[in-house]
Image (tube, rainbow, N blue to C red):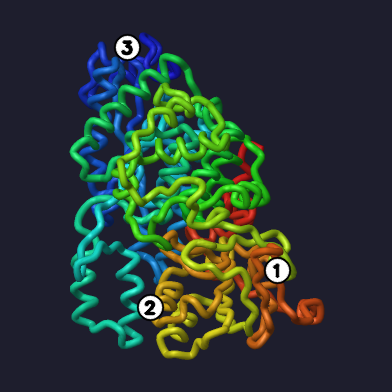
């Protein structure tokens, strides 16, 4: 066992003494040592229940003949930090979470690991760490929150963000917004649409590194503790079989994950995160792979943010196995290993569709003929940009640029009525290095919807979007402004063209002339964690990683 490095008797008697001080017995030390890494915190409903689930995982490990040892890492709540300087910490936290998992596990030579995840950066971080370490392990998703009820309709955190814009536009009273605020999040669990958390949970299940049963169940489902216990049993089996993450997370598995994201209308953040996970796993993946799969994969799931239903509705309809069945029926699902012990095709064959469900359509009744994401290139994005196709039907937008060098200024312009129909909002210097941390623009995009401008403006940014964003939005513009990208040269009034059919993002402006007099902005931070991140982070077109990965 790997753990013999720290526990073999008599050489490691001092280490054994330390471990026995924690309550472990000599018998415990003869078993595989399993790290149970939790991202528990009571700062967010996404993660506040993970302490109890971690206890259930540990019980499963014990019953399967292993010895669990618990550790913890951080979480940064997007929903809380959104629109504030703290949002810069969100994407940066992904890599630091992966780093802390690696340090905890490698520092103590554990035999296997289970990572419990909640808020959305914890999910790709878990997969990145598992791929990087390549020791037996799996991820367990804490599960979705249930929808709230407001004015006789289901609501999510998305409705609260949009309510801010509606309130500013006089379409909702402050009293109504206060009432909505108190009802949108009724308990534990991650944001309830096919936002980034549920999108990435879907992706990890189709990568095979998380079980479909454990992923499907909402946070407060009575079966969730049993699913956590099953995860504990599963990791011990993985250790005994020496089934490794890179054996599971193959090129074909990534294609499965991308197809599932496209079919469910998932978050654009999946592009960023899957690129990073693939590099950790030593799998070559690029932006063109996402576009190719999107072009041939329709949107079948009628899920928020662009659809009617919340994530728990998908579970009731048939869950991820039904998604797998839809893909397999069209020859679009590769078979392969999973941490559950079942093959991916076996998971698809086990789908049970609820009669009359309206959440997940059939291939011939697609909501959209292609996936919810398109990759654009052009004079504004030589290295690529990610367009969101969910929640609107527009294929082209041509309009004058309204340029902002930060999100708060853009948000103020929306609230003050300075944005007009037809405009193209440009928010720059908010990329991985520029912000730093590539914050999400949900405050702005939600305010646009709330102000009634969601169908008449476009927005481009070298930052990124929340999974709750919908409309004609293009993010991840690369190169970013801070790294000399053309987006840094745009001026108010420049005519910008966004064209989905041609996959182009262009500006009519003398960029070469402007480049000669362009003066890049100095780094925002000169010390601390954000300075370090600025020095290390790569391009969004390659996953915004802080190290080269295994490629």
Residue 319 vertical placement versus 120 (above, below): above
Whole-percent x, y for residue 495 in the image: 68, 82
Q: CA distance from mark 1 to mark 3?
A: 56 Å
Marks 1 and 3, the one that precedes in the sequence? 3
Mark 2 or mark 3, which is nearer to you?
A: 2
Q: Is residue 245 left or right of residue 23?
A: right
Q: Is residue 287 left or right of residue 205?
A: right
Q: CA distance from mark 1 to mark 2?
A: 34 Å
Whole-percent x, y for residue 102 in the image: 46, 36
**Picture residue at 21% right of the left edge, 42% below the top:** 221
Residue 450 vertical placement versus 134 (above, below): below
What element does badge 3 sit on? loop
Whole-percent x, y for residue 350 in the image: 38, 28
* Residue at which label 3 appears: 30
Instruction: Report the disc number at residue 250.
Output: none
Residue contact at pointers 1 and 2, CB within 8 angstroms: no
Foreground: 393 or 207? 393
Q: CA distance from mark 2 to mark 3?
A: 60 Å
What element does badge 1 sit on? loop
Is residue 170 shown to the viewer in this render? Answer: yes
Whole-percent x, y for residue 8 in the image: 39, 12
* Residue at which label 1 appears: 484
* Residue at which label 2 appears: 450
**Picture residue at 44% right of the left edge, 41% below the top:** 323
Residue contact at pointers 1 and 3, CB within 8 angstroms: no
Mark 1 or mark 3, which is nearer to you?
A: 1
Marks 1 and 2, the one that precedes in the sequence? 2
Mark 1 or mark 2, which is nearer to you?
A: 2
What element does badge 2 sit on? helix
Give the quarter of the image for residue 302.
Answer: bottom left
**Picture residue at 58% right of the left edge, 79% below the top:** 424
């Amino acid at each position: 066992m790997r753990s013999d490095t720290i526990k073999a008797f008599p050489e490691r008697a001092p280490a054994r003494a330390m471990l026995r001080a924690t309550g472990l017995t000599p018998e415990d030390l003869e078993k595989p040592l399993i790290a149970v890494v939790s991202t528990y915190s009571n700062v967010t409903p996404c993660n506040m229940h993970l302490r109890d689930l971690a206890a259930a995982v540990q019980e499963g490990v014990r019953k399967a003949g292993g010895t669990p040892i618990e550790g913890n890492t951080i979480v940064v709540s997007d929903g809380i930090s959104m629109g504030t300087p703290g949002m810069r910490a969100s994407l940066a936290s992904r890599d630091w979470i992966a780093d802390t998992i690696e340090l905890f596990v490698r520092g103590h030579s554990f035999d296997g690991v289970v990572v419990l995840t909640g808020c959305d950066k914890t999910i790709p971080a878990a997969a990145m760490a598992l791929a990087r370490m390549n020791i037996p392990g799996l991820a367990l998703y804490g599960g979705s929150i249930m929808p709230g009820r407001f004015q006789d309709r289901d609501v999510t955190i998305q409705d609260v963000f949009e309510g801010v814009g509606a309130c500013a536009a006089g379409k909702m009273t402050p009293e109504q917004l206060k009432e909505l605020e108190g009802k949108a999040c009724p308990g534990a669990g991650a944001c309830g649409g096919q936002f980034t958390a549920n999108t990435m949970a879907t992706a990890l299940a189709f990568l095979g590194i998380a079980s479909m049963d454990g992923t499907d169940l909402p946070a407060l489902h009575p079966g969730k503790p049993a699913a956590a216990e099953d995860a504990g049993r599963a990791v011990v089996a993985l250790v005994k079989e020496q089934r490794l993450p890179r054996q599971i997370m193959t090129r074909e598995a990534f294609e499965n994950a991308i197809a599932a994201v496209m079919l469910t209308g998932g978050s654009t953040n999946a592009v960023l995160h899957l690129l990073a996970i693939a590099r950790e796993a030593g799998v070559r993946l690029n932006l063109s792979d996402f576009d190719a799969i999107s072009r041939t994969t329709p949107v079948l799931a009628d899920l928020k943010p662009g659809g009617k239903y919340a994530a728990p509705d998908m579970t009731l309809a048939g869950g991820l196995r039904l998604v797998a069945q839809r893909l397999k029926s069209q020859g679009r699902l590769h078979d392969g290993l999973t941490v559950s012990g079942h093959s991916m095709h076996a998971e698809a064959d086990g789908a049970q569709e609820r009669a009359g469900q309206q959440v997940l359509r059939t291939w011939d009744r697609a909501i959209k003929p292609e996936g919810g994401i398109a990759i654009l290139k052009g004079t504004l994005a030589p290295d690529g940009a990610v367009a969101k196709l969910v929640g609107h039907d527009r294929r082209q937008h041509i309009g004058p640029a309204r340029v902002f060098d930060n999100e708060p200024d853009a948000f103020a312009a929306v609230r003050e009525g300075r944005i007009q129909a037809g405009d193209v909002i440009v928010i720059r210097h908010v990329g991985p290095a520029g912000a730093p941390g590539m914050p999400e623009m949900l405050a702005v995009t939600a305010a646009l919807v709330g102000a009634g401008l969601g169908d008449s403006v476009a927005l481009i940014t070298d930052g990124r979007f929340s999974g709750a964003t919908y409309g004609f939005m293009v993010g991840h513009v690369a190169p970013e402004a801070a790294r000399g990208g053309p987006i840094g040269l745009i001026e108010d009034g420049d005519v910008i063209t966004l064209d989905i059919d041609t996959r182009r993002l262009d500006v009519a402006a003398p960029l070469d002339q402007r480049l000669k007099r362009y003066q890049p902005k100095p780094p925002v931070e000169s010390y601390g964690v954000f300075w370090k991140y600025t020095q290390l982070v790569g391009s969004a077109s390659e996953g915004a990683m802080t190290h080269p990965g295994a490629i």
